[in-house]
Amino acid sequence: MKDSTDRPLHPRTRAVHAGTRRSQYGELSEALFLTQGFAYPDSASAEARFESLGDDEFIYARYGNPTVAMFEGRMAALEGAEDAFATASGMAAVSGALLSMLSAGDRIVGARALFGSCLYVLEDVLPRFGVEVELVDGTDPAAWERAITPGTKAVFFESVSNPGLEVVDIKAVSALAHAVGATVVVDNVFATPVDSRALDLGADVVIYSTTKHVDGQGRCLGGVILGTREFVRKTAEPFLKHTGGAMSPFNAWVMLKGLEHMHLRVGAQAETALTLARDLEGHPAVARVLHPHLPSHPQHDVARRQMAIGGTVFCIEVRGGKDACFRVLDALRVWTISNNLGDAKSIVTHPATTTHQRLPEATKAALGITPGLVRLSAGLEDAGDLRADLMAALATA
Ligand SMILES: *Cc1c(COP(=O)(O)O)cnc(C)c1O
């Protein structure tokens, strides 16, 4: 998308305009085409459309829908990707991208620090279909180098892991993967789609759970797979349109409206997250603060290089373990105990007993999911109110 002088437009402008398709009514706001089916003027047109689908033609909402197509066009323009396929949830995007490209006998190397459902797909689902999976310490370049052997088909990691905030060096791992011809699939949720550099750094496929920062107001589930036209339309789309992971038109419409103010929201939330993380460093009840843009973060240099913003999520390790954490969480009045993130409402999560509860204790320990770990997602409230609430609650630890 370019302006009248042929200058490429800023991502903020693309987030408001890119991908818009207007009907004959010239509606200003994107139309919600809440329809699963499409009528054909005659039988020959139906036959022609099933034979080959034009860019502005649709046959069934599991395959495509004008509102969903607008969302896909906008996300692709924003990320700088050739194309995008919108999915029912972030996990439909992760599982769809991986299952559509992998076959029995293939090998995939992944980072060990993953969101619980991503870990389930790699540890439980893929091996059942004969895919060889090796999980490594994503922060250790030597471990990636050992594991990415010739014949490796794909590499998968969260650029910033949920919840431990381990940062994976996209550029370094992509170089190793490309040397053996492997496809690099990056779950970029925690980095957010704001000023994402994942494709420039070497990722081949980028995935978002749009449930998080794109909706940003905790209403709808959604996901998106971004990549080359070849991957999106020839690999991901056939799998997804026949297995059923399509995004609903209503959700796509909510996501489109969310994108219009995503940069403002996420920018403000990221600023609040970093401010609060700084304020909490050295607090007597807090053993450790984790935020990718704090100099104390173990991969701070990589995080500074590859993330324009540090994200909207940070973690603290409360002294005194689970009991102390529960006292702090239960004392909060402005923060909400929940498990969404990137939401307008500030949210606290105790991963060990909720999102990552099902993991064996040894895995939790290896991922840094200790009994004292609390994940905080900064919302849109006043940072002073959020800070005062946290300080008062921490006094009960
Ligand atoms: C939330 C999340 C997902 C899954 O997204 P859903 O929309 O809930 O399916 C995947 N990866 C990461 C890193 C997430 O935070």
Image (tube, rainbow, N blue to C red):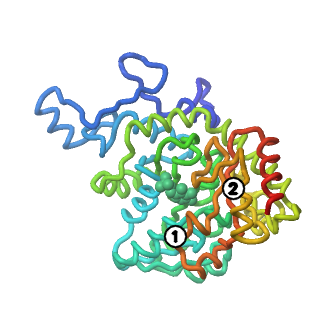
Residue furthest to the top in view is: 25
Which residue corresponds to mark 1?
A: 155
Q: Amino acid at mark 1?
A: Val
| Mark 2 closeness class: few <14, some 14–19, many ≥20 residues within 10 Å | some
Q: Percent x, y for residue 282? A: 88, 62
Name which residue lies at 62% across and 47% down: 342
SS state under label 2: helix
Name which residue lies at 66% across and 54% down: 348
Rendered image quadrant of residue 36:
top left
Q: Earlier in the sequence, mark 1 or mark 2?
A: 1
In this rendering, does residue 275 appear at all?
yes
Q: Percent x, y for residue 72? A: 45, 41
In this rendering, does residue 199 appear at all?
no
Left or right: 283 as drawn, with respect to 51: right
Which residue corresponds to mark 2?
A: 330
Name which residue lies at 79% across and 63% down: 397
Quarter of the image containing the N terminus?
top right
SS state under label 1: strand
